[in-house]
Amino acid sequence: MEKRQQPTAAIRNSTFSEARDAFISARGLVFTCEWRRFPWTFGADVEPALIGPSYLGHVAIGLKDGWRWGYQDRDGRWRYVQRDRLDVLVESVIEDRAGFTPPLPRRSRRRGGA
């Protein structure tokens, strides 16, 4: 059985730079690069991720298998877009995550008297 090769670090870095530039040029959205753990990573491994602005709920976009961009929509489902379709990635992330409102913190009952 043939094992799929992971992309080299140089290819991965240029791919993330292209994606970050696509968000800036298409919509003026600034994404940062950080290290995150995704469902497709193993153990304590972390992978590079594009982290979106608060307007998009700080969405984390990762590169799964080196061939598909993956991110979570508002409902927590994972969405995937082909690596070379940056225009589709930009539009689908914005459509799924625009205007994200984080849930309010839960209030706990006060202990003792009021």
Image (spheres, rainbow, N blue to C red):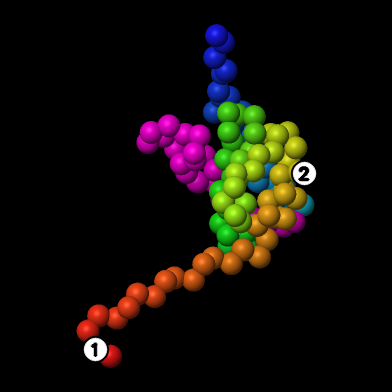
Which residue occupies 24% across, 88% down? Answer: 113
In this figure, what is the number of numbered marks?
2
Mark sitting on residue 98: none
Q: What segment carries the magenta color?
A: 27-53
- Image-quadrant location for residue 111: bottom left
- Image-quadrant location for residue 52: bottom right
Above or below, comparing residue 104 to residue 29 in the picture: below
Q: As drawn, is 35 to the left or to the right of 58?
A: left
Residue 36 coordinates in the image, percent (x, y): 47, 44
Disc nearest the viewer among 1 and 2: 1
Which residue occupies 65% across, 57% down? Answer: 97
Q: As drawn, is 96 to the left or to the right of 12?
A: right
Crowd class of label 1 (few under 14; some 14 to 19; many from 20; radius 10 Å) = few
Mark sitting on residue 87: 2
Spatial CA span between label 1 and label 2? 57 Å
User: In the rendered structure, are the residues bearing label 1 and label 2 in contact, judged by CB atoms less than 8 Å apart?
Assistant: no
Which residue occupies 60% across, 44% down? Answer: 78
Residue 8 coordinates in the image, percent (x, y): 56, 24
Q: Which residue corresponds to mark 1?
A: 113
Above or below, comparing residue 42 to residue 102 in the picture: above
Q: Is residue 42 magenta?
A: yes
* Sequence-wise first label, 1 or 2: 2
Residue 39 coordinates in the image, percent (x, y): 49, 39
Residue 86 coordinates in the image, percent (x, y): 73, 41
Q: What's the residue type where badge 2 is placed?
A: Asp
Q: Is residue 31 visible?
A: no
Q: What's the residue type where badge 1 is placed?
A: Gly
Q: Residue furthest left?
A: 112
Q: Quadrant of the C terminus?
A: bottom left
Q: Is residue 6 magenta?
A: no
